[in-house]
Image: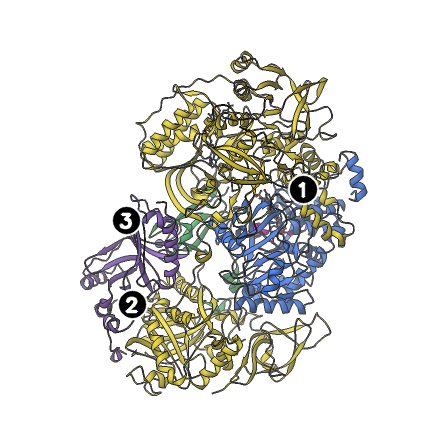
Chain colours: A blue, B purple, C yellow, D green
Amino acid sequence: MNRYSIFSLIRNSVNYHQDWQRAWRSPDPKKEYDVVIVGGGGHGLATAYYLAKECGITNVAIIEKGWIGGGNTGRNTTIVRSNYLWDESAGIYEHAMKLWENLSTDLNYNVMFSQRGLLHLAHSVHDMQEIGRRGNAIHLNGIDSEFLSPAQIKEMVPFININCRYPVMGALLQKRGGTARHDAVAWGYARAADAMGVDIIQNCEVTGFRMENNTVKGVETSRGFIGAKKVGCVVAGNCSVLAEMAGFRLPIESFPLQALVSEPIKPILDCVVMSGSIHAYISQSDKGELVIGAGSDAYNSYSQRGGFDIIEETVGPVVELYPIFSRMKMLRQWGGIVDVTVDRSPLISKTPVDNLFFNCGWGTGGFKATPGSGNVFAHSIAKGEMHPIAEPFSINRFNSGALIDEGAAAAVAH
Amino acid sequence: MNDQQPQVASGSRADAVIKTTSPAYNRKRTEGDNTLVELPWIGKINLRGNPEDSRFVEKIKSVIEVELPLESNTQHHNNSVTVYWLGPDEWLIHCKIDRVQELMAELGSQLSSIHHAVTDVSDYYTVLQIQGPNATTLLRKGCPLDLHPEVFKSSHCSQTRFGHASILLHKLDSSTFNIQIRWSYTEYLWDYLVTALDAVDR
Amino acid sequence: MNQKNRLEQGGRLNRTKPIRFWYDNKGYEGYAGDTLASALLANGVNLIGRSFKYHRPRGIFSAGSEEPNALVQLEKGAYTEPNRRATEVELYEGLTACSQNCWPSVNFDIGAINSVLSRLFPAGFYYKTFMWPQSLWMTYEKFIRKAAGLGVSPMEPDPDSYDKTYAHCDVLVVGGGPAGIQATLAAGKVGARVMLVDEKNVFGGSLLSDNVEINGISTQEWIDQQLNELRKLENVTLLNRTTLTGYYDYNFLVANQRVNEHLGSNQSGNAPKERLWKIRAKQVVLATGAIERPLVFADNDRPGVMLANAIRTYIHRFGVLPGKEITILTNNDSAYYTALDATEAGAKVVIVDIRHNPGGELFEKAEQAGIKFITNSTITGIDYAKGKIRQVEIMQLDGDGQGVTGSKSQLPCDLVGVSGGWTPTVHLYSQAKGKLKFLDDKHCFVADTETPNKLNQNNPSFSVGACHANYGLRDCLIKGFDAGKSAAQAVGFETTEITSEISCNEPESAPIRPLWILPCDHPVGKGKKKHFHELHNDSTVADIELAAREGFESVEHVKRYTTTGMGTDQGKTSNLNALSVLSNLRNTSIPAVGTTTFRPPFTPLTLGSIVGQERRELFLQKRKTAMHPWHDRNGAVYEDVGDWKRPFYFPTHNESMHDAVQRECLAVRNSSGLLDASTLGKIDLQGRDVSKLLNLLYTNAWSKLAPGKCRYGLMLNEHGMVFDDGVTTCLKENHYHMTTTSGGAARVMSWVEEWLQTEWPDMEVYATSVTEQWAVASLNGPNSRKILEKLTDHPIDDESFPFMSMREMNIADIPARVFRISFTGELAFEINVPARYGLALWEAVIQAGKEFDITPYGTEAMHVLRAERGFIIVGQDTDGTVTPMDLGMDWIVSKKKGDFFGRRSFVRSDTARERRKRLVGILTEDPNIVLPEGAHLVEKLKDKPPMDMIGHITSSYMSPNVGRSIAMALVKDGFNRKGQSFHVPLIDGSSQKVTLTDPVFIDT
Amino acid sequence: MLIIECPWCGKRDQTEFSCHGEAHIARPLNTEELSEEEWGDYVFFRKNPKGLHYERWVHAHGCRRWFNVARNTLSDHIHGSYKPGETPPTIDTQEVSQ
Ligand SMILES: Cc1cc2nc3c(=O)[nH]c(=O)nc-3n(C[C@H](O)[C@H](O)[C@H](O)COP(=O)(O)OP(=O)(O)OC[C@H]3O[C@@H](n4cnc5c(N)ncnc54)[C@H](O)[C@@H]3O)c2cc1C
Ligand SMILES: NC(=O)c1ccc[n+]([C@@H]2O[C@H](COP(=O)([O-])OP(=O)(O)OC[C@H]3O[C@@H](n4cnc5c(N)ncnc54)[C@H](O)[C@@H]3O)[C@@H](O)[C@H]2O)c1
Ligand SMILES: Cc1cc2nc3c(=O)[nH]c(=O)nc-3n(C[C@H](O)[C@H](O)[C@H](O)COP(=O)(O)O)c2cc1C
Ligand SMILES: [Zn+2]
């Protein structure tokens, strides 16, 4: 891999950029790999990267049915934060946050990780109790967390309508929270993994698993059988479909979740603002468009789009909270298929099939976990034992009752 | 418990001496030829039972003197009561407010041996009436039903949605609709319709 | 007259109505009927803004909604709007607009330095740089952000109003060109309910840019004739200025109508600025026309380069000739119409045709008109200075058109018209998940309506006219009519009767030369000149080449890497050219490359119109109780509980919240207080099996509840976690009254109904919600009986009316159900009356209580009072992870009765675990300290985090009755740790010492 | 935005309904005897198929009746609705899978 540097950029510009290398190869699948990762989203690519970089396993393939980063990684509102309530969650999201903070340098790819600060608004006494509990828990877990008064919120977002239908009573701020450029995350991991020998195989759909003695031996794909000593599935919204191929069910349902962007404008919103109880999530991208997280349809669906009613339910609160945006315009709306667990926490787990691992259930909020999730999943696959940070997220919790219920306490999981 | 019947049995006697209110009490709004009002108190009884049990159907008829509507989205009425179909085993009786207690008691005793439920919901709902040439246009703003006169004909009724609220919509004639709505949503619906009235292209 | 490019006559304008407007602070004049773009062109203004990335000067490129360049900041102050397409903004008196993305001015723009440095900024350059050192990224980002974006957001709330409405129809026709008008007519005539929408201010579509004859009359006459006929049909709704923005499932379509916007700010009066139509159509006819495809040649972004057909539109629709000397660059015949019309309008026209031997009827016509042709050649450069094109450079194409040969020649001109053929507007069909097919002969995608695919089987639709690549007018008219017929037929209308006679003269077109990326005197991408396939985001052919070189092969990757098609125009003029570059690079066909996904909206949609009237008071309902008017009169401060507005506390004499709550709490324990408890959920249950149902719903046993008796219960979900609680009363045999929490009312009702209807249809229970039937005043305190006695004759002594029972009686002559239950631990009566009497009851009790200083109290005092007694609040002391045992409420979990919801979950290994978090009381060492709710307990205090937490404070108050602060907490192994001390470290670095206790602070 | 047919009220806009997930999950009667896995399976695990899905809806803004719908989760095409207790319509799954 030719490293990117100021010099390489200048050198190439002289030459009209004719000499840039491919960011990743486009190899034909080999007969067999030590590890096959199914799913070329951020989590899958990160898993392969850390397998190669930290676990010394480079005979790895990523099998992607479409184009890498085309799943939820390419559809999310790019919010990154680690201010979760439960210790287990704080563990994995903060692990991710620390990796984010060094990711561009680590990958030699600018993922535009922008720690511009992230606000959670509280609109009721109940909300205040919720952010109170979470803010304190985060603080005691050693993660940055601050409470803001309405006046302080106004300072950060002067045009916010504090006296809206559900008045803004306070907020939780994570200064280290922010956004990252979603596509760049996929591409950066792909390029760095490829450079260490990982094969990225696109347009190749996994259609089944080959198993012997309840042990996985490889995957059947649209491009033929590919052998594997171990298989990690990281296919987000499609995880139930793959689980069915392997003969088991998951505590997961798939829903369409939507987002929208406005036309690009000059900088106006310098932080990320989330409001769970009136449902408005908004930030401004580096390109200038307002990125707005919408809701999900309340029925299972694999169509990557949702109803217009959800857009109405999203834009209403946005305009209520930010009346100045009423004359702004929606440029595009789209949807992704999110994999939602009952407790709104992910599954990083062994499965009933030996050597087959699943990493899914990130639902509406897994982009922020990408580095951390890939990292612990890589270690777990390499060792055959779950990494301590991943351990609590095992599928067994749905039998034992040891849920990590981020939904129950906050009902917010972006 | 029956020995402890309240001393004022019917609404009417209490109503005579006691101030009653509702969210849009005595309100009326006219814009052009269109008028919005809250109707004075109507008695409302929720009725449950099995329509396949002919005894049930007949007893109801004997008490209210109207055939129970068995088809969805229909209502039957005579001079004093209207019965709305609400579900396959659920109806709503509209009557004069001072007849509620009497009808409830009568229904209760007639149906005593049949599985049923009779519940006073007179105060659970209010009824707004919108009247005028733009009535349909106004209702279309919040209601997803097809209200075209050929589709939603006079005398039709339907439970549906208006904005965020559930409503029971009853078309009396080509320009008159009754909208039954939950008490606490009345003000919301009122404001919504008034806003719509203001914006009518006249 | 200053409108130097205005033609003496022509155009659908009202020349008697001149209109003053301002652009970049300079005054101009146009006519009613102009768009901002046509008026500017009439005045000779064609430098409109600066481009997104390189800040290159840009002008007006089109005459419609596909405009990628001419984006302006419309109006000022609260009325301002960024990124408005000048080609769509209708002129009105006083209109004010400014150029965007340039500073200090559009003529001299500092940002243009980017253009000089452009070689450093290829596609995706961000990803390769700004990493050294990483810590500086946030600083770099600040500058990057400033450079990006286009216009500016308004900074004041929107003063305009919006409206939205549902609509239904049999046939929705999208596009009011010849095809759409005919379709509407056909379906309308047979009686179908038809809606016709068109985004333009007038109907006619491309006919507005045309001057042919239909059935022997002019296009304008023909349009008028048809519209007259349509207006006569009551079943036809015509909506102009209405853009169909989104095509969703089951023929749900969203259209945005600009009702009064074209009148300008302050003009709208009562009528809305915009109206959103939410349409359900049984059938849809898409007649959205086609967008002219540009050719990509050297420096093709210069102001003065314009789509050929746009020039024609400016001539015919606006009476504007945007240039005097026009060079037309084309690969097909349709630009010849422009050449002919421009010549007739007085321009000097030269056609540069990249074809070797153009010929045919139109060619001959053009030659006859004296138009000069240069064939097999292309423009290889543009001499542009001071906002104007002076001349273009022409060279001959080599054999396959990939290079140029021979010598350069110069051709003076002030306007360049380009035409690369047409791209059907298939956006909507594709939004609806309809499959597209590629027509090899016409080099474009159209809707594949013949082989409908399963993904859009819910969206029955037709595609017709230019949007189906039928470019002949006669064809459009006939097929449009047929489509309207077929659509009506599909809905069930008899259509055999009607026919339409069409005659019009159309010359045959010669074939197109399928070449869109035109070479220049240096290899494309390697040299000074830029080939923009996408003007809006400054994306060049070289960018696509670079993306492909770097392995971004998928069209979706190319889109995201180069941002092509991601601008406010969504690539309407550029997508196909991008695909053709990519297909060349990958040596494959365009359909093999595939398109990116079309998504709504078709053109950007105002957020305000999505909200419609549902803003401010109508944003979300505020539910109020019957007593609300009294609360208002008595200065209540409200708390939002779900949709409800509940009194939080009642301050008197400018009291603080703290003082009011303390006073209210004392009053209740010392004398009496009155709480509005109307919002409690209430369900009426009747039937033989109610007690059976209650046994399943609640954890305790219900079989033996006698009439008139009340019982408290906890409701669990199947996970075994508490999700609601309340008191249920047996009114009489087989008749019960259940109460739920205010927030949980709907959830519980639905929970009960779902089980009854789906799992146990044979259970004889009817459930009816009566929440709002009953207004509830809860009278609490030692004097409450004395007060009540004044209002009723009914005996209410302990013996006739014991605790946990219900009596029906008159209170103040109002028929009431009175419950002797208590959430404060005091003597209490919950008086339920029909809501219409709620206010009267409240006032009567207040009146009767005067002598006892009866005190109205709000939810906060209620919270304190119940905490003093150790009563829980579901949702505050529980969070969906708490079992009854965790609450120390084992007593309410029946061991004897059979199954109930959640019971099996108790014995799961984690739920049965010792040392779970349990609810305990908390006393601070300093009795004056009220811990913040949500603070956590630790065993070992450290200098700084991380610290291991063992639980958190769920409720915390200053209790005037206990005389100190009290709190509750969920603490690991809490029951076994009572008496032990722990620390509560706070976020400000301080910490409090606390002791675990029983959660009951005032005992009976 | 679907159009759903309520078995009683007829075809209505989706916004009048709410979805309550997979249908035909009978509540076990012998909860005591179930293993942790079996109980967990009942409470949390779902089919979540890509393709034909039998699911429960309620006509929340209408007659407030629960009923079942057979819908393709990929195309969102609804094959039909039926009342609780009725046997689901048989649908050629070949035809359903895209
Ligand atoms: C609208 C929206 C907004 C969101 N906002 C946020 C946010 O602000 N912050 C946040 O943290 N998270 C957010 N999320 C969630 C986040 O996007 C996801 O949790 C995260 O991107 C998941 O990454 P992934 O790599 O696991 O999955 P994906 O990126 O979806 O990757 C899975 C890949 O598997 C492939 N695949 C599937 N089946 C097969 C098969 N059979 N064979 C081969 N390949 C297959 C897919 O094509 C896909 O590329 C949002 C999600 C959406 C939809
Ligand atoms: N000579 C040629 O090569 C050539 C090429 C193309 C078209 N044409 C001519 O163009 C005409 C085509 O007629 P037609 O009726 O198919 O198309 P049209 O272009 O006349 O009409 C389409 C109409 O649809 C409207 N529209 C597009 N998208 C819309 C949306 N989302 N919402 C609302 N309105 C929308 C446009 O404003 C336009 O008025 C014929 O006269 C044909 O001869 C000729
Ligand atoms: C953070 C973010 C910002 C986006 N900004 C834009 C944008 O400026 N313009 C645009 O056309 N699309 C934008 N998109 C949407 C994409 O074009 C696309 O709709 C999305 O990646 C989903 O893919 P699909 O629509 O091809 O299915 C953005 C998407 C994301 C996730
Ligand atoms: Zn129904």
The foreground one among A189 and C232 is C232
Subunit under mark 3: B
Q: Quadrant of ligand 4?
A: bottom left
Task: Say what secondary structure mark 3 lies in.
Answer: loop
Task: Say what secondary structure mark 2 lies in.
Answer: strand
Subunit under mark 1: C
* Residue pointed to by mark 3: B175
* Residue pointed to by mark 2: B120
* Residue pointed to by mark 1: C104
- Compared across the picture, whether A181 is left or right of D70 comes to right
Residue C963 in sight here:
yes
Magenta-span inclusion, residue C311: no
| Percent position of residue B62, x then y | 18, 63
The answer to whether the residue bearing label 3 lies less than 8 angstroms from the nearest atom of ligand 4 is: no
Tell which tag, 1 or 3, sits nearer the viewer.
1
- How far separated are the C-alphas under marks 3 and 2? 30 Å
Q: Give the extent of the magenta segment.
A: A230-243
Magenta-span inclusion, residue A241: yes
Label pair 1/2, CB-CB below 8 angstroms: no
- How far separated are the C-alphas under marks 1 and 2? 72 Å
Label pair 3/2, CB-CB below 8 angstroms: no
The answer to whether the residue bearing label 2 lies less than 8 angstroms from the nearest atom of ligand 4 is: no
Q: Are marks 1 and 2 on the same chain?
A: no
The foreground one among A296 and C809 is C809
Query: Along the polypeptide, which appears first: circle 3 or circle 2?
Result: 2
| Percent position of residue B33, x then y | 29, 49
- Compared across the picture, whether C231 is left or right of A341 comes to left
In the figure, C372 relative to C690: above or below?
A: above
Categorize mark 2 by other alpha carbons within 10 Å: few (<14), some (14-19), many (20+).
many
| Percent position of residue C34, x then y | 49, 33
In the figure, D48 relative to C947: above or below?
A: above
